[in-house]
Image (cartoon, helix red, strand yellow):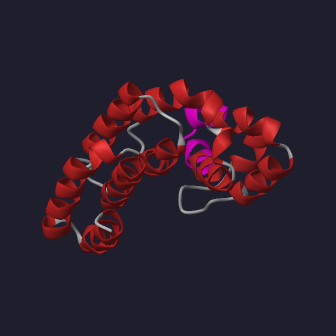
């Protein structure tokens, strides 16, 4: 069971989440089992599942597509910072309708109010990734990232400079 790889310890460790990524690489049909852990009652399991799902979907983004509706809903309701930062990276990998892109954009803009600098920084990345896939979003997102690059944390400023360089090409 994938959940067994994600239990134990505390949030300072990823435990055996890399083994879960390896398992998904060899058995992609089990990706849904991994995603179920995003709703687990244990925040450590949720965190590690989000890490594993993000890593697995980086290599195989198509794994996310059958779970699009549930992931968009989770993105809107998630409060745990580790879930938020991984969802900010995963959701833009999906093929989204205009309405779904708007939902994702709204959620990512909401993440910019999070107290976690990591959530804010990865929300910037997620917004940029949406803008790369949809040119209509680009002007507004570029302006948002410009503003955050002037006023954000050091991490946000550094990420913002890189994102602006990519978006303004």
In the rendered structure, the answer to whether residue 126 lies left or right of residue 145 reads: right
- On whether residue 40 falls in the magenta region, the answer is yes
**Residue 73, image x and y in percent?**
45, 26
Taking the image as drawn, is residue 47 in sight? Answer: yes
Given residues 124 and 52, the one toward you in this image is 124
Number of disc labels: 0
Taking the image as drawn, is residue 41 in sight? Answer: no
In the rendered structure, the answer to whether residue 78 lies left or right of residue 28 reads: left
In the rendered structure, the answer to whether residue 39 lies left or right of residue 121 reads: right
Given residues 12 and 73, the one toward you in this image is 73
Given residues 14 and 104, the one toward you in this image is 104
Specify the quadrant that holds the C terminus.
Answer: bottom left
**Residue 76, image x and y in percent?**
38, 31
Q: Which residue is situated farthest in the right direction here?
A: 26
Given residues 58 and 37, the one toward you in this image is 58
| Image quadrant where residue 19 sits | bottom right
**Region of the chain picked out in magenta, as a range:** 36-49
| Image quadrant where residue 121 sits | bottom left
- On whether residue 162 falls in the magenta region, the answer is no
- Residue lying at 21% horizontally and 51% vertically, measured from the top left: 139
- Residue lying at 73% horizontally and 54% vertically, measured from the top left: 21
| Image quadrant where residue 12 sits | bottom right
**Residue 148, image x and y in percent?**
19, 61
- Residue lying at 61% horizontally and 34% vertically, measured from the top left: 65
User: Mainly helix, strand or loop, the magenta region?
Assistant: helix
Specify the quadrant that holds the N terminus.
Answer: top right
């Amino acid at each position: 069971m994938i959940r067994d790889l994600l239990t134990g310890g505390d949030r300072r460790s990823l435990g055996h989440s890399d083994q879960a990524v390896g398992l998904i690489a060899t058995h992609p049909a089990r990706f849904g089992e991994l995603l179920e852990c995003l709703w687990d009652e244990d925040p450590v399991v949720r965190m590690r599942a989000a890490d594993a799902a993000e890593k697995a979907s980086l290599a195989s983004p198509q794994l996310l597509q059958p779970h699009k509706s549930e992931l968009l809903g989770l993105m809107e309701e998630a409060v745990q910072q580790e879930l938020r930062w991984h969802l900010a990276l995963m959701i833009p990998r999906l093929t989204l309708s205009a309405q779904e892109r708007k939902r994702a954009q709204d959620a990512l803009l909401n993440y910019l109010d999070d107290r976690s600098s990591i959530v804010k920084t990865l929300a910037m990345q997620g917004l940029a990734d949406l803008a790369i896939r949809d040119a209509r979003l680009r002007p507004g997102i570029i302006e948002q990232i410009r503003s955050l690059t002037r006023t954000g944390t050091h991490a946000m400023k550094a990420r913002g400079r890189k994102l602006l360089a990519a978006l303004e090409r």
